[in-house]
Image (cartoon, helix red, strand yellow):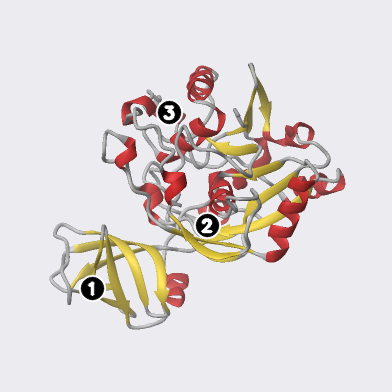
Amino acid sequence: MAGKAMQIDTELSLADFDFDLPHELIAQHPLADRAASRLLHVARGRFEDRYFSDIEWLLRRDDLLVFNDTKVINARLLGRKTSGGRVEALIERVVEPTLALAMVRTSHKPGPGTHLIFDESIHATVEGRQDEFLLLRFERDVYAALAQHGLVPLPPYIEHAADSIDALRYQTVYAARPGAVAAPTAGLHFTTDLLSRLRRRGIEFAHVTLHVGAGTFQPVRVERIAEHRMHSERYDISEQAAHAINAARAAGRRIVAVGTTSLRALESAADDSQSQVRSGARETALFITPGFSFRIVDQLLTNFHLPRSTLLMLVSAFAGVDRIRAAYLHAIEQRYRFFSYGDSMLLERAI
């Protein structure tokens, strides 16, 4: 990890990843049909305006698609302190059955021993602080409490309260392993029918798991991006998935990451000496910026990302800073929909 982090271009600043986005292009609701979203194919030297369902013809028959099968939990809790002040908590991760790290918003930051009431049956006590997160001790199983009273953790740029549609659509159709507090949004465009058609064409699938954390909502607060530190996230790559990925690479087939989370898991698990993926469960705080040397992923399917964000830095590293700037300008001119419920891009690796 340390060696990879040293590849950050120290000359880059936060302003290099800024752009002006009309507010009306921020998608507030999903389309009725997942696969009806638009897709910008960023090929070498050209842009192609397509629809997501065209992915079937943009992929090769022997490509290996790698999906992140994490499942979004109802990680948002609303409540109050015993003093009466309002509290909003976004669970970052469940550490033990009754212990969780959470991003907590209140008028005054609660200290150790503060009692929080999210529902008459859901009480928690602040045990301490870890960086920007609070350690909360619940009186019952955290997952059970979230399943009963938690809300879908929509990103802050989605301005409506989460409803039954969000509960269904802010989740991929292949989600399997609970633990994420944000959706791996590139996968939201796939339908079960589209997945079946891809399989019939001979395209192979592999699944990894990276539980997207609350840190994904945190802005970069330093001007020199080399000084930024990523929040750690958990990922897991099974022996079966690692074997499929390594076999595909050995055969010269393309590895197509569905989303930045799948890419981060794969590149975090890369064996430095052989450029193969190692199986196992680990933590990653890998920060990918221009200058990063990709070992595993050949193509990236992704949504459009926020200005000045680490995800915009990642796609700029993958496809090239100038190419991504031009692609985003093109997308704005062509009125693409942005962010979680927005449209998508298929990127070819620059190097």
Badge 1 density bin: few <14, some 14–19, many ≥20, Cα 10 Å: many
Q: Compare residues 173 and 102 and report the one nearer the observer.
A: 102
Amino acid type indicated by mark 2:
Ala
**Is residue 193 visible to us here?**
no
- Distance between mark 2 and mark 1 Cα atoms: 28 Å
Q: Position of residue 188 (x, y in %)?
A: 60, 47
In the picture, measured across the screen, residue 84 lies left or right of residue 49, that is: left
In the picture, measured across the screen, residue 251 lies left or right of residue 286, that is: right
Q: Position of residue 312 (x, y in %)?
A: 45, 34
Q: Residue at x 50, y 33 (%)?
A: 317
**Is residue 122 visible to us here?**
yes
Q: Nearer the viewer, mark 3 or mark 1?
A: 1
- Image quarter where the C terminus lies is top right
Badge 3 density bin: few <14, some 14–19, many ≥20, Cα 10 Å: few
Residue that carries the numbered disc 2 in the rendered image: 167
Residue farthest toward the bottom in the current orientation of the protein: 139
**Could you say which disc has been placed on residue 24 in the image?**
3
- Distance between mark 2 and mark 3 Cα atoms: 23 Å
Which picture quadrant has residue 318?
top right
Q: Residue at x 41, y 40 (%)?
A: 310
Badge 2 density bin: few <14, some 14–19, many ≥20, Cα 10 Å: some
Q: Secondary structure at mark 1?
A: strand
**Could you say which disc has been placed on residue 190 in the image?**
none
Q: Position of residue 88 (x, y in %)?
A: 28, 60
Residue farthest toward the front in the current orientation of the protein: 273
